Image: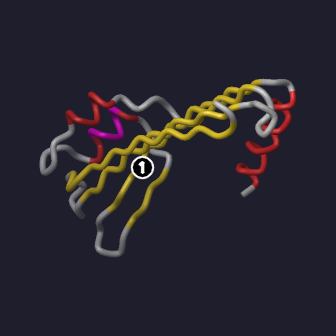
Amino acid sequence: MKFLSSILFVFALLSMTGCAHVVQGRDIDQTAVESFKDGIATYEQIITAMGDPRLFQSNSDGTKTISYIHSNTKVNGLIGLGGVMKSNTQVVQFRFDSKNILISRTSSNSNSTYGNQ
C-alpha cells in the first residue's frame, strides 16, 4: 500500500509540472516467452532467461505460478484540464507442476487512456 501511495504522490507532483513518465518492471521479451514450450521448459530455465518474477505463488499441491509485469505510464498536462494519461501494461504468467515443468503460460497486454485526447 505504501508503494502505491508513493507512486500516486509522484504522479501528482509530476503532473503539476505538466508531464510524467513512469516505467515499472523490466521489459518483457515476447519472443523469449513464446520460446518456452509447455511440458518441456523448466522453472529454472525461465528464471535464468527472464530474471526474477514480480510475483510468485506456491500452491499446496506443489504447483507454482510466477508473473512478470511491465507498466509504462505517461502523463502530459493536468488530467481534467486538458491533460492526458496513457498507460500500457503487459503481464505474463507461467504455471508449473510439482516437478517445476511448465504447464501453461498466459500473456495479456492492456492500453488505457484517461483525459482529453
Taking the spot 30% from the left edge, 40% from the top edge, the residue there is 46
x then y, percent, for residue 8: 76, 45
x then y, percent, for residue 32: 28, 30
Q: Is 55 rendered above or below residue 31?
A: below
Q: Quadrant of the N terminus?
A: bottom right
Taking the spot 86% from the left edge, 31% from the top edge, the residue there is 16
Asked whether residue 11 is drawn in magenta, I would say: no
Residue 39 placement, left or right of 76: left
**Magenta stretch: helix, strand or loop mostly:** helix
Which is more toward the observer, 110 or 66? Answer: 110
- Mark 1, Cα crowd under 10 Å, few <14 / some 14-19 / many 20+, is some
Which is more toward the observer, 14 or 116? Answer: 116
Which is more toward the observer, 115 or 68? Answer: 115
Taking the spot 40% from the left edge, 32% from the top edge, the residue there is 28
Q: How many marks?
A: 1
Q: Quadrant of residue 80?
A: top right
Q: Quadrant of the C terminus?
A: top right
Q: Mark 1: which amino acid?
A: Ser
| Residue assigned mark 1 | 67
Q: Quadrant of residue 92?
A: top left
Q: What is the image's colouring?
A: secondary structure
Residue reaching furthest to the left: 39
Residue 13 placement, left or right of 8: right
Q: State the extent of the magenta-drawn residues as a range.
A: 45-49
Q: Is 18 rendered above or below residue 100?
A: above
x then y, percent, for residue 57: 42, 61
Q: Quadrant of residue 45?
A: top left
x then y, percent, for residue 102: 22, 51
Q: Secondary structure at mark 1?
A: strand
Residue reaching furthest to the bottom: 60
